[in-house]
Amino acid sequence: MIRNPRAVVKRLILLPGIYQLVAFVRAKRFVVSGESMVPTILPGERVIVDTLAYRFGRRLRAGDVVLARHPERPGLMMLKRVGGIPGNEVGARTLGEDEYWLVGDAPEFSTDSRQLGPVRSGDVIGRAWAVELPGRAE
């Protein structure tokens, strides 16, 4: 039995708001330089990435747009869509326990898991949260 229903309701309302505030503060902003996510995200657009999205037990899901470290070029980041999750078959292989298949929305312009292979969750920095509106950049 719930002793104080108001306190429960208050927590249910406040916790998501607190999480969103922390996520916004911890968010990374970056400018997209390539065409791999056209038409979803265009070159030159600024993307806000939630760096806490996968820190508290939430798993990457097919369809998420994520920022990940490039496996072959240290310091380079890549913005891609999760196209495969553990257990999925992609091409001639089945993804392992911590393997994700990342692809661009414009395959003709994208260097992604088709060339680089799967990415581990530890290489994913966060989930694309929003695209900043023009004129709002710092």
Image: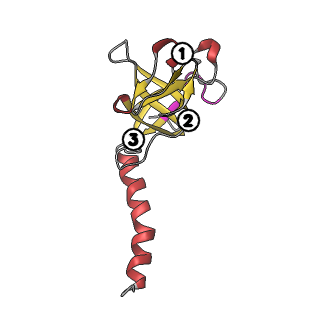
Residue denoted by label 1: 114
Seen from the viewer's position, the closer of residues 108 and 60 is 60
Q: Residue 48 placed where, x, y %?
A: 47, 37
Q: Check residue 27 in the rendering and tell me which mark sits there, or answer none.
A: 3
**39 sits to left or right of 72:** right
Q: CA distance from mark 1 to mark 3?
A: 28 Å
Q: CA distance from mark 1 to mark 2?
A: 35 Å
Judging by the rendered image, the residue that carries numbered circle 2 is 135
Query: Secondary structure under badge 2?
Result: loop
Q: What is the span of residues highlighted in magenta in the rendered image?
A: 40-47
Crowd tier of the residue under label 1, counting other residues whose Cα lies within 10 Å: few below 14, some 14–19, many 20 or above: some
Q: Disc 1 vs disc 3: which is toward the camera?
A: 1
Residue 122: x and y in percent read 34, 32
Cα gap from disc 3 to disc 2, whole angstroms: 19 Å
Residues at badges 1 and 2 in contact (C-beta under 8 Å)? no
Q: Are marks 1 and 3 in contact (CB under 8 Å)?
A: no
User: What amino acid type is highlighted by mark number 1?
Assistant: Arg
Query: Going by the image, does 132 lie left or right of 73?
Result: right
Q: In this rendering, which labeled residue sits more in front, label 3 or label 2?
A: 3
Asked if one can make out residue 34 in the rendered structure from this viewpoint, the answer is: yes
Image quarter of the N terminus: bottom left
The type of residue carrying mark 3 is Ala
Above or below, 12 against 82 in this view is below
Q: State the SS at label 3.
A: loop
The amino acid type, in three-letter code, at marker 2 is Gly
Q: What predominant SS class does the magenta segment belong to? A: loop
Mark earlier in primary sequence (1, 3): 3
**Residue 41 colored in magenta in the image:** yes
Q: Quadrant of residue 83?
A: top right
- Residue 134 within the magenta-colored segment of the rendering: no
